[in-house]
Image: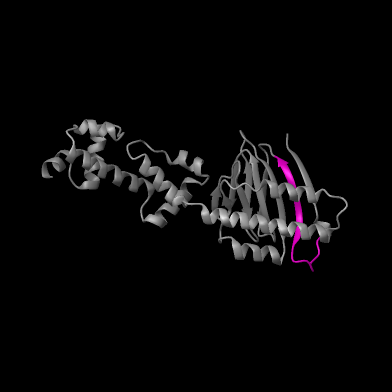
Amino acid sequence: MMNETIFNFWHLNDSKLPLNVLMSGISYCDKNYRIERHGENLYSFEYIIDGSGVLEINSQTLYPQKNDVYILTKNSDHIYYSSEDQPWIKIWIIFNGDFAESLFKQYLPENTYLIKECNILSYMNEIISLSSATHMDYSSFIDEVTVLLLKIVLRLKNHLKHKAPTVSEQIKSYLDGNIENKVDLDDLSEQLGYSKNHMIKMFRETYGITPYAYFRKHKIELAEQYLLNTHLSINEISNKLNFADQHYFSSVFKSVAGVSPSEYRQIK
């Protein structure tokens, strides 16, 4: 059953302040949890404590899961919903204002909506603790939250800066490491938290080729080395490289190399 702790500050918003908090809270989602917004004046950080789900934002489809941060930006079109099997437990804050806009412009790359494996739970817990404090006036509350939001943005910025591989590089590394195996982009999509179409698009933009074409090309290059430098039969090479059968291997080999495996071995 859906359970949420929500702190609402809409009624306290002050246009003179550089930052306003609209809402904050903790959500224990269920399979029916779904939020949709179009072009609203808000920003949000949502940290996934546990579970998984989907974020569709500005034509991207992303898969936030445990220990990820997803980001909602001003004027974005977004829909997000929890998985049925492992619904989200998440802690979040929604805010706006000139300071918020400046934070995003100065510190975070444009069109960044998901940051993987970046733990900001301690900061988010502090925000919830401040949200629940009955003794604090709104202006003092905003002062405290402003500092925490800056800390969160700097944590995200530094995480992105030192996060070694891009999505494209992660895909390439996965393909290179599994060149003799069968690969499934659906499995990789789940691991990386990006839709398969988005991964293909990113990979093509980086390397000028689809992941499938890259993988096939390099698998055949390895087959060429086996043909030149070993006494393995064509069938053995086909099996070693996890092709369905020798006929399919020969067909793929000829489409890439221009000759059949047996012809390649004779020519070289």
Q: How is the image coloured?
A: one colour
User: Furthest-left residue in view?
Assistant: 266
Relative to the observer, which residue lies in front, 12 or 118? 118
Measured as percent of width and height from the top left, residue 135 is found at: 88, 52
Q: Residue at x 31, y 44 (%)?
A: 216
Q: Is residue 217 above or below residue 244?
A: below
Measured as percent of width and height from the top left, residue 93 is found at: 71, 52
Q: Is 19 in the magenta?
A: yes
Relative to the observer, which residue lies in front, 202 or 255? 202
Is 40 on the left-hand or right-hand side of 260?
A: right
Q: Is residue 118 above or below residue 15?
A: above
Is 75 on the left-hand or right-hand side of 237?
A: right
User: Image quadrant of residue 91?
Assistant: top right
User: Image quadrant of residue 143?
Assistant: bottom right
Q: Is residue 50 above or below residue 55?
A: above
Measured as percent of width and height from the top left, residue 13 is found at: 80, 61
Q: Quadrant of the N terminus?
A: top right
User: Furthest-bottom residue in view?
Assistant: 16
Q: Quadrant of the C terminus?
A: top left
Is 7 on the left-hand or right-hand side of 74?
A: right
Relative to the observer, which residue lies in front, 245 or 215? 215
> How many numbered marks have been drawn onto this rendered protein structure?
0
Q: Is 118 in the magenta?
A: no
Q: Find the magenta span and give its range.
A: 13-28
User: Furthest-right residue in view?
Assistant: 135
Q: Residue at x 54, y 55 (%)?
A: 160
User: Image quadrant of residue 140?
Assistant: bottom right
Measured as percent of width and height from the top left, residue 107 is found at: 60, 62
Is 73 on the left-hand or right-hand side of 245?
A: right
Q: Residue at x 76, y 56 (%)?
A: 22
